[in-house]
Amino acid sequence: MTFLRRSMVLAAILCSCAAWGASPRVGYVYPAGGQQGATVQVLLGGQFLNGVSGVRISGDGARGAIVQYGKPLTNKQLMELRRQVTVLLRARRAGDNGMTLASLLANSEAFVLSKVAPLPDHPLLRNLDSMSLKELEHWVAQYSDIKKRQPNPQIAEMVLVEVAVEPGAAPGWRELRLVTPAGLTNPLNFYVGTLPEIRETEPNDQEASLAPADTPVVLNGQIFPGDRDRFSIRAKAGQKLVMQVNARRLVPYLADAVPGWFQAVLTVYNAAGKEVAFADDYRFDPDPVLLYEIPADGAYTVEIHDALYRGRDDFVYSISVGELPFVTQVYPLGGQSGDKTSVSVIGWNLANKRMTLDTNPGGEWLRRTSLVQNGLLSNTFPYAVGGLPECSQKEPNDTIEKAQTISPPTIVNGVIERPDDVDLFRFKGKAGDRVVAEVCARRLGSPLDSLLRLTDAAGKVLEWNDDHEDKVSGLITHKADSCLSAQLKEDGEYFLQLSDEQHNGGSAYGYRLRVSAPEPDFALRATPSCINVGAGRDAVITVCALRKDGFDGPIELSLKDMPAGFTLSGGRIPAGRESIRLTLRAPRQGPDTPISLSLEGSAEIDGKTVRRDAFPAEDMMQAFLYRHLVPAREMLVSVTNPQKPAPPIGLAQEGPVRVPLGGTAQVVINTPKRPMLQNVRLELSDPPKGISLHYLTIVPDGIQFTLKAETGDVGYADNLIVQTFVELEGQNKNGKPAKKNQRNELGPLPAIPIEIVQP
């Protein structure tokens, strides 16, 4: 048996990943939405998508089907493409609009199709024959000019998908994933709406290429380097138009661009070409919103571009334009769980000024809702549901003498009503008491950048806080909400002072201030939201513990409502740890279709068992450096290769492997005995500092290796992820052996819990 053949057999024995190589991923979908009752063709760009076979869309009322897949075109193919399209350009310039590219090439005696770089069937070529002369010229400049191309392998493969939206589909956001031989891709946002949608037609950087559109309407497009897109709309005097951009909402973070997202700029011009409105954000949200009352009947131009004039295929946007309901502020910003909570709403094109929030017990504390006005859906806005008694802030309370008296535990609903406004609250405390004060404002859509101070009766600052990180808020990069904790030294009166760090204020600067003793708790986030795992094999999951008010105990993780055969290894977050990597094993007879994964964490807090669901998220990189947990709607498991299940592999011992500080411990992995096990190599994946792996040997029960703890802290606990691989002798193009061997990944072993102990 050749070494290559032995390695392939090894993969069948030890490989714990869904497929060799990286997971399939998508970077954009264009357009990122469709109207009720419409069938639209959308283009997705991604990587490792070869063999794509299906589409999964969350929720009801929308389904998708694969139309076409296209791998990246080579430079030679792009040159051949330009050569062929030149024939079509000449015909259009000569006034021949009826001939197709195929017929022109067939009738051209001088043209010889390239045998070196024949053109494949590709989504980029699907509409060439229907393009106008200007469209063709722009297309050539955009896609076939090698010098202007900015290749990005992460979005180089293309998949054309047809999405059918049922007439009665509920409007709102969905998650769209592709199904590939290696499993599911990460999710992308796709909006099912009620408004008609149009796409840009290039070129439209100098003037709109489409006839003026009636509103309401959704405008869709992509921004390329140096590009600006223009649309013409018809409007009447007195119309209160809302123009809301979705750009960062569609692609939350760009890993290889600064500031880390498409920073859209929106401008409106009148018929004379004069700028009449402009926006490059909405408060702290990078996606701009324009609220503009039309002064006179006529045609207006809506223009969008990137603030830095960057661009590429994943700079996708949609702009909702019309007399749409838009909520700019809500008060209060939430309510007590189980209580009927009516709030006032302010904004544009709102017939109703009040609404009732859903505060039913259960679910997360942070919820979202929207309004329906005249059959149109407003923007969604967040609100909070708390478990403490609530009260309202009352003016005047700007000085210690006029400070408002509160009785913790409580949640105060208030507003920083004007620039340099300060809200003060008085409460009584006892020596030894610990008090927690937490502001929730930015997380609820308020522009408030809170500053919180705790003082004694003499005005001495005992504790203060400006920004407090909340990892749950993955789309908010400025953690502007404050939180402080302090132990009181003596009986007496204490004061909380709340203001805006930027000295701003206004009716929209609402907040919720929690004042109470510590309420130890935790929340869980699990990544990735798509887990691709081979039948009988293991996949790595990361679970993050978002600890609250000093809770630092261990959290036990378990599967919830899962089919038989799925198991976790390393399902425990040790005390004090904020995250852990564990492995999920799929059954040898796995389900044929993706299933929802439910993870639950339980912990003992103040003598009670507290259970919290682990909600799905995507771990996204921003601008080469920063990482964020972006919430997802569902967590799915796709079991691949059910026809070739892996034999069982597991840790020989029960419980954690105890490694003496400065010493070693032996680990045995039970595997089916095969002669080719000697070719397997092991490597720790992101191990804790000071932990290393040595001396892999074959033993009767499988394989054995040594763990060494050179440095660390006694009592430290973690899970080790061990990657398996083999090395093959590579070859150069000339057939001679390469200087470096080719590494073939086989996947992770089940997670190995460890604990550093006294020697």
Image (cartoon, grey):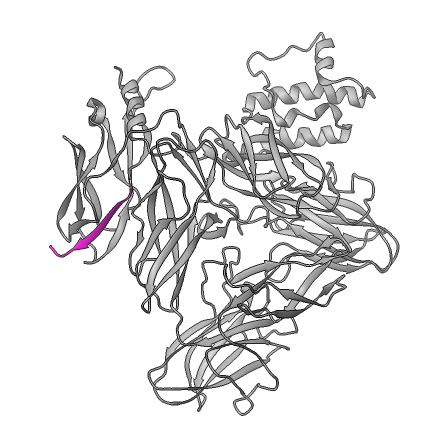
Chief SS of the magenta region: strand
- Count of numbered badges drawn on the protein: 0
Which residue is at the far left?
759
Q: Position of residue 188 (x, y in %)?
A: 56, 42
Where 608 sits versus 430, above or below?
above
**Residue 320 visible to the viewer:** yes
Of 334 and 421, the residue lying toward us: 334
The magenta span reads 751-759
Q: Nearer the viewer, residue 515 or 260?
A: 515
Q: Is residue 623 magenta?
A: no
Position of 653 with respect to 309 (left or right) is left
Q: Is residue 741 visible?
A: no
Q: Where in the figure is residue 535, as x and y percent of width and height?
A: 37, 31
Q: Quick check: 502 left or right of 541? A: right
Q: Is residue 624 left or right of residue 502?
A: left
| Quarter occupied by residue 210 | top right
753 part of magenta stretch: yes
Q: Is residue 44 above or below residue 8?
A: below
Please tell me which residue is depicted at 59% across the width and 59% down the height of the picture: 368
x and y, in percent, of residue 13 in the image: 28, 27
Which picture quadrant has residue 613? Answer: bottom left
Residue at the image position 59 percent from the left and 50 percent from the top: 249
Quarter holding the N terminus is top left
Q: Position of residue 402 (x, y in %)?
A: 56, 90
